[in-house]
Image (tube, rainbow, N blue to C red):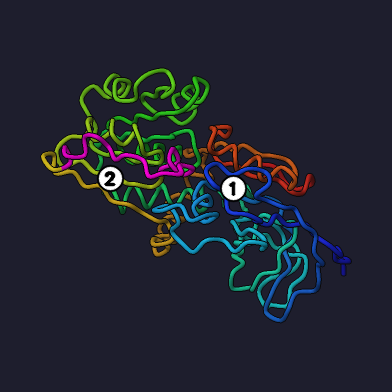
Amino acid sequence: MTALPTTGRAWHLVSRPHGTPGPDDFALRASPVTEPAEGHVLVRNHYFSVDPYMRGRMGDTPGYAYFPAYPLGEPLPGHAVGEVLASRAPGLAPGDPVLHFAGWREYAEVPAAEATPLDTDGIPLTAYLSALGMTGLSAYAGLFEIAGFRKGDTVFVSGAAGAVGSQAGQLARLNGARRVVGSAGTDEKVRVLVEEFGFDAAFNYRAGPVDQQLREAAPDGIDLYFDTVGGDHLEAAIGALHEHGRVALCGAIAQYNDVEAPPGPRNLAQAIGKRLSLRGMIVTDHQNLLPRFLEEVAPLVRSGELTWRETVTEGIERAPETFLGLFTGDNTGKALVRLDPQAPAR
């Protein structure tokens, strides 16, 4: 039996951020690694995810904390993939690849029931943190369950070069959208949207007013808006939506670090006359869709019909900067931290 490590490092939240988090809000601490308890497994994490929703749980930001705030002084959770090092549970053996929710650390002891075995036949391990993970399910649930996508829809996706937005746009295209338009924060990301992800049009929201650029990209208006940004993007979408248009409110990353509540869209009254449907979503409400989602999307991943980008940071030491980079647009696609330089790359 391979000897287990004696210690492992984990990132802890040590203070509540006010506004944009900073490095002093986090601390990297070492703790002992021991044999797992009965019914548990010990996992060596290869990759873990950093996600915008975590900002709401770091403090008491009104409207964005979907769950209780993270306790101070405890390791931060988050989705991670890795391999079982030691097991005291039937059905899981050393070497098995698993997904779990004890990221932001090098080694994790988790109950076997919370470690999901992964099928890596033709599917990269990191896909379960992106295209086949929470972000992919968010895109799927938001598009089909929340916004009621219909074949022939014209779809606008904000933050479309991000992990969720890039999947939402592709799923719309692959399911018969008439036109898919996306926004992104750099000209290079705009190129990726069109040339790699197959969007019909895209624009750099920093290059001019969003409403004007959206009118140019979708001159006949839109039927469905998938929102990951909020703010001026939501206002522009309300103006461009047809009657009975639908909006999936998946995120509002432009506002997560605000210390005061931002003003609402100035044209919200249009939602009345247009009879718009604006519906918020939290992905954990849609776990019932997971089997259907995997059945439909896993073959698209295997065939390469649906693709994704990853921005991978090497080393646990850089986790906070990777997280903070989400709010300045440093990532294209899914932002991941790789812990083990020997871990298989995509």
Magenta residues, start to end: 252-271
State which quadrant residue 165 falls in: top left
Q: Is residue 297 magenta?
A: no
Question: Which residue is the site of mark 2?
Answer: 149
- Taking depth in this image into account, of 344 and 281 the one nearest to the observer is 281
Name the quarter where the C terminus is drawn.
top right
Pointer 1 or 2: first along the chain = 1
Residue 222 against residue 209 in the figure, above or below:
below
Name the residue rendered at 32%, 52% in the picture. Answer: 280
Which secondary structure class fits the magenta region best? loop
Image coordinates of residue 226 in percent, x first then y, are 34, 41
Name the residue rendered at 43%, 41% in the picture. Answer: 255
Q: Is residue 259 magenta?
A: yes
Residue 67 against residue 211 in the figure, above or below:
below
As helix, strand or loop, the secondary structure at mark 1 comes to loop
Image coordinates of residue 97 in percent, x first then y, are 67, 59
As helix, strand or loop, the secondary structure at mark 2 comes to loop
